[in-house]
Amino acid sequence: MLDSAATRTSPPITVTGQPLIERGGDILALTPRQIRRIARARGPSQTLPGIVMRQAATEYRLWLVRKVNFRHRDNHAAVSAYCEMDGDDFRGINARQSWSNWRTIPRNLAGRLPNRPVRVIDLCCGIGESTEVLACYAAPGSWLLGLEYSPRFVAIARERSRAIRDDRGQPADVHFVAQSVLDTFRDDEDQPLADASIDLVNASGAVGCHFDRAATAVLAREVARVLVPGGLATIDSGKSGTSSADLRTLFADQGMEQIGDAHSCVFDRYRQLCMRKS
Ligand SMILES: C[S@@+](CC[C@H](N)C(=O)[O-])C[C@H]1O[C@@H](n2cnc3c(N)ncnc32)[C@H](O)[C@@H]1O
């Protein structure tokens, strides 16, 4: 049985019963005010200082009591540390990331994501908190797949998936698979994803922390393989993993051009780049 705190998701809120997003045109249109409003309605309800303190306390306890340190650029070391965590540990250390996702991801999707059902992959999805943001912004009828190394996190994500909603408050078509994203991406029927079959690939809180340049080169090849022409990749970058300059170069080598970037607030050291496959 999974712990209740770990399986909790934000309530399926629509503001005054209306869809959260007006989907008039061909492309997702969002104002900064709408993004803030949706982040408050669907994202973590704690204040940012409270979130930062919670994260620091969990990280300190993990490190001091259990000698678990997940802050590794070496991907093997990072996933080994994540595999030591249970759902509550993860919620604690991911608290800031979870807050950021509700701001960074929509800023990158606004004005770019088609307003029709799309096929989405969320790389390194943890317990599905970033997937929940993608499910809210992808048009109703979209198909979403979260890929995550830790089988324990995938079990929690699957449990939570029943409560993951689109912007109308309807259950989203979301699936989770346990695998390394450094291997061929596979679907929930254990089939390799076809070439040019995905509209959007997202990574949040992963490549900028836990992937060195060589690992990101492997990832970029696989992302470019599965994306449709014109498809989007929103991938996080950071100095402790792969920098934004390296990310831009590695994706350019795969025929992908940077078309934007976003971060959650002025204190956020990680930038998520948005790239388009030509
Ligand atoms: C900081 S968490 C971010 C989780 C999620 N994207 C979010 O924003 O809530 C980083 C996650 O990346 C996963 N991860 C790291 N390397 C991975 C790999 N090679 N394959 C799959 N998952 C990986 C870790 O297990 C961890 O769950």
Image (cartoon, helix red, strand yellow):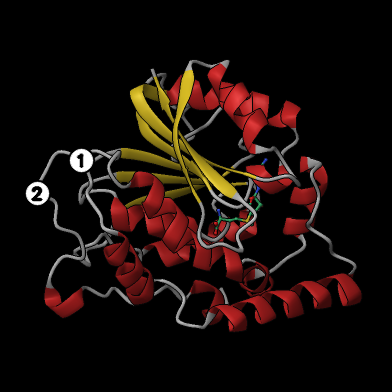
Other residues around mark 2 within 10 Å, as few (<14) / some (14–19) / many (≥20): few
- Mark 1 CB lies closer than 8 A to ligand 1: no
Above or below for 150 versus 229: below
SS type, badge 1: loop
In the displayed structure, does residue 145 sit left or right of residue 86?
left
SS type, badge 2: loop
Q: In the rendering, at what x and y percent does residue 161 appear?
A: 40, 61
**For residue 188, which quarter of the picture?**
top left
Above or below for 94 versus 229: below
The kind of residue on which mark 1 rests is Ile
In the displayed structure, does residue 64 sit left or right of residue 240?
right
Residue at image location 62% in from the left, 51% down from the top: 270
Q: Are marks 1 and 2 in contact (CB under 8 Å)?
A: no
Q: State the mark number for residue 157.
A: none
Count of labels in the image? 2
Residue 1 in view in this figure: no
Above or below for 190 versus 221: below
Residue 7 in view in this figure: yes
Q: Quadrant of the C terminus?
A: top left
Identify the residue under disc 1: 27
In the displayed structure, does residue 116 sit left or right of residue 153?
left
- Taking the view exactly as shown, the residue that stands out farthest to the front is 266
Identify the residue under disc 2: 24
The kind of residue on which mark 2 rests is Gly
Q: Along the line of sight, which residue is nearer the eye, 229 or 149?
A: 229
Above or below for 76 versus 48: above
- The CA distance from mark 1 to mark 2 is 8 Å
Q: Along the line of sight, which residue is nearer the eye, 148 or 97?
A: 97
**For residue 252, which quarter of the picture?**
top right
